[in-house]
Amino acid sequence: MKAWLLKFHRWTALLFALPLVVLLATGLILSFEPWLVDRAIEPGTLSPARIEALVKQHDPGGRVRTLGYRSYDKALTISAGRGGGTVVDVGSGQALSGPSALANTLVTVRRLHETLLINAGWIVIGATGAMLMLIVLGVLMGLPLVANTLSGWHKAIAWFLLPLIVLSPLTGMFMATGITFASRPPAAAAGQGAPMALTEAVQVLGKDHDLSALVWLRPQGGRMLARVVEGGEYVVYAVTREGATVMPRNWPRLWHEGNFAGVWSALMNVVASLAMITLLVTGVWIWTRRQIRRRARHLSKAELA
């Protein structure tokens, strides 16, 4: 049985090697984003009044519906909807030609991680499922005899870092299937008058929360939502005229993206990504080396014959 499990483990890895390389490499890059955001936040540097002034300056028609803020760029994106919009330097107040090279790189890497840039989310889900299958097969093969060899190190990494290795593809699969483990938030109340203007939401949110740690503010699901970094965690609030109410945590997203404990959760994802990349590379190399040796033996037998 162990021999068959090993073959299934090996051929599953080889079949999905290419998409897994892309997923793991992009995941490693994205692991640094929460750290970049958290370390760049300067408390008290972005007030509701400053945001309102920038919105009025760059959206005199009052069409803006969403805000996005990148603390590592000190840039506010003002948009009438998701995507596009005007990128503004919050210090000078001047419109920029677009997001920075770093921001564009992270956006592209995220799209590559989620859709392979070709709307192939189904391949991403399949590769994630394959990663979970590889983990299950590895566990079923039993505890290894760890030795100071390439195969020994491969097995040692897999077993000693098993919780982190399981967590990444498992939470990714939860996200893909819409599992949040959060209680359903109360429905947005009807009959509350005119919809809340974005600048009004900024004022309400800014009363009790530092907008220098804002990630985004936008209407979603019939309510105005905001995502703010607080204590290293990305917290989502529902903003109404009565105030900002914290929304239930989406733990699979927080764990998968590594944005629940600042630098520490980012580091957790870096370690997990490096471990999985090492497992994939060493696994493929072990198989390749075995094939090379097998071919050499066949050639040697043929020469002797």
Image: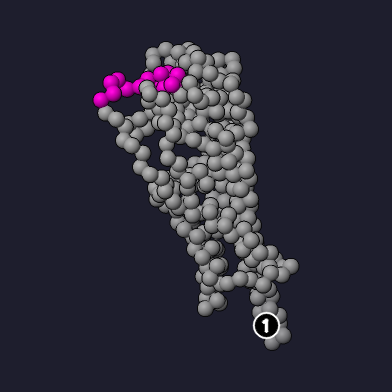
Q: Is residue 202 magenta?
A: yes
How many badges with numbers are in the image? Answer: 1
Image coordinates of residue 304 in percent, x first then y, are: 72, 85
Image vertical order of residue 2 relative to residue 286, above or below: below
Which residue is denoted by mark 1 in the rendering?
A: 302
- Depth check: give the residue in front, 260 or 120: 260
Q: Is residue 11 magenta?
A: no
Q: Does residue 280 appear anywhere in the picture? A: no
Image vertical order of residue 178 relative to residue 239, above or below: below
**Where is residue 305, by image quadrant?**
bottom right
Residue furthest to the bottom in view is 305
| Residue that appears at 47% across and 15% down | 52
| Residue that appears at 42% across and 48% down | 181
Image vertical order of residue 226 relative to residue 142, above or below: above
Image coordinates of residue 28 in percent, x first then y, are: 60, 47
Q: Secondary structure at mark 1?
A: helix
Image coordinates of residue 83 in percent, x first then y, are: 44, 30
Image vertical order of residue 97 relative to residue 170, above or below: above
**Amino acid at the residue labelled 1:** Ala
Q: Which residues are magenta?
A: 191-204
| Residue that appears at 61% across and 48% down | 268
| Residue that appears at 62% across and 25% down | 42
